[in-house]
Amino acid sequence: MRFISWLGRIQMPSMMREYAQLIHPPTDISPDKHTQLLRMSFERLIYGFTVMPIIAALAALFYGRQHSIWLMGLWAVGYVGAFFYRKRLIYEFDEDAHSMDGHAMMARWVPKLKRIVTMHGLALCAPFVLTASDPSFEFNTLWYLVIAAIVASNAAHQTPVLGIFVRFFNCSWNVATLLSVIAYPDDWYYITPMILMFTGANYRHAMMAHKFFLQQVRLEESSTRLATQFKEAKEAAEDALIAKNRFLATASHDLRQPVHAMSMLIEAISQRNQDATLSPALADLRSSLRSMNLMFNSLLDLSKLESGVIAVEHKPVHLQAFLHEIARLFEHDARDRRLELRLHLPKQAAFAQTDANLLRQIILNLMQNALRYTQHGGVLLAIRQRGGTWQIEVCDTGIGVAKESQSDIYLPYFRQKLAWGLDSEGHGLGLSVVARCALLLKSPLDMSSRLGRGSRFWIRVPSLSAGVLQTSAGDASFEIASYKDHALSPINQGHCLIVEDDPQVGRAWQALMQSWGVDVRIVSNSAEAFECLSTGFVPQALVCDERLRAGESGFELLKALMERIPQARGAMVSGEFNAPALAQAEEEGFLVLRKPVDIGLVHDLLSRWLMAQR
């Protein structure tokens, strides 16, 4: 055993000492990768034990043609025993690989494999000793070629753990090199130098293969680490987006409450107004409030776009009325900036099949940009027919967009230098929202611009034929954008129950209903609602806010009230846009009104419901 240990520690030739540091396991590789490298070397050793019995038997037969075969036969039988021993090795290795980490595997199996390859290497050199008494030039030459092939193959596949290969190389080829004097007693002086040349070339090849294995493992680890970091960053960004959207969804309810109350109070004041000089001011106030509501909805729409919760609903839209309303929203802004705001509309009625909310978001953002970056001249809002589509254009005489910036203007947070110098408001999100909305609509969006001369943005929406329009006229999905700037006529009939836990909004509901002549009761929870019914009040219309401070569900309360009064009509009111209860309410056929509610829509609903009950 001392002899074997000494052979295993033979010093490497001086030409290869520069690679000595590679023999030690690298410390910058994870334990799992150490196990992977160890398995590669182990599998190569097992493959050697699989084919060696055949090679040994053929070698013994070749030598036995002219010489005594019994020593070589015993040697070949030894490799047959190694063939069966490999099954035990495989079982032990797999068991340890499942129960140990990389460092423990290296600590146990590297010394064990070194002992095995030491025995294997010496066994490969044994034929030179066994046939020394009756040497055969042909057999020794053949066996040197066999060992050279085995060593070269192991240099390519056994070097993941370099220490194992070095031990095998020293105990096989280097020992065979020393024995060349015995194998070729008359010819060693020219054969041995050739063997030494192969030694240097093969060892260098082994070092290059080892470096390749390490490089591949490091690349795999780097890729895995980058993939993990990307996944963590993606999950963190998604969590942040969900948290932001959750915050906006929660905050929007509270932010919508005062706007919701203001819209109802303005309508109530308009009903009671007896001073004709105040009517224009009330109309402007109503228009300004609607503008504020639309801008506020734009902020929430951006959150919806980012979270992917927007459901696109293509419905008929009356484009003339649609653009008239948008133009009214910007009349005061254009007047304050001393700009001319013009409309160019076709003479025939223009109807489009599109999502009115997304289209409104697009035009609003384009109009805001056009007015913001125009100092002289004006803005044109136009509709033009282009084949089977309507092209909606927003043209201005503003600063324009430089050619080098035109490919980037739809990117989030991008603003060209001239824009920063002209107006510091905004964050470069408007055109990004425009592009996202157009993508959802699947509508072509484009622009043309000349620096210092102005810009023209346009989007095309499918036109609606007269036949389709007549078919859709009786459908509930048929929508024509219409807005009322005048006070609504009183209803003067009916009973209505409002469930609203915000006192300010409750008072606004009461003022609005009373201005319309509707008998109304305002309650804040289910207990008050059923107590009101027990007094003999029988409402024909029920309106429930979804989020109640007592933790109750407005939807569940609405269903309970309608079971109590089956002839009543009911609707939900909420400032949220993706609450599960609201989705369930809509699926079950209940009407859901979003805060701030459209006062004209509420008036129309109550008029129909209360007249039907009469």
Image (spheres, grey):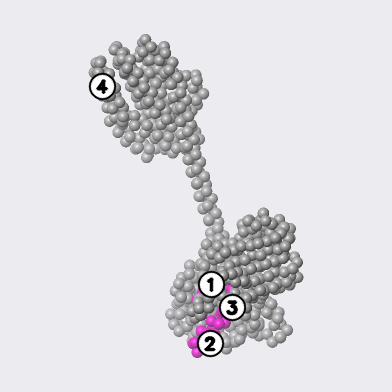
Q: Report the residue marked by disc 3.
A: 349
Checking the image for residue 353, the label placed there is: 1
Q: Disc 2 and disc 1: Cα gap in Å?
A: 37 Å
Q: Magenta includes 597? A: yes
Q: Are marks 3 and 2 in contact (CB under 8 Å)?
A: no
Q: Residue furthest top?
A: 186
* Residue shown at 36% from the left, 22% from the top: 145
Looking at the rendered structure, the kind of residue marked 3 is Ala
Q: Disc 2 and disc 4: Cα gap in Å?
A: 114 Å
Give how far across and how far down residue 460 sits, in percent: 58, 67
Please tell me whether residue 552 is drawn above or below residue 22 in the rendered image.
below
Relative to 376, is 343 on the left or the right? left
Q: Are marks 3 and 4 in contact (CB under 8 Å)?
A: no
Looking at the rendered structure, the kind of residue marked 2 is Gly
Q: Read off the magenta span.
A: 591-614
Relative to 574, is 129 on the left or the right? left
Give how far across and how far down residue 503 sits, in percent: 59, 75
Q: Report the residue marked by disc 2.
A: 494
Q: Nearer the viewer, mark 3 or mark 2?
A: 3
Q: Callout 1: 10 Å neighbours few (<14), some, many (20+)?
A: many
Q: Nearer the viewer, mark 1 or mark 3?
A: 3
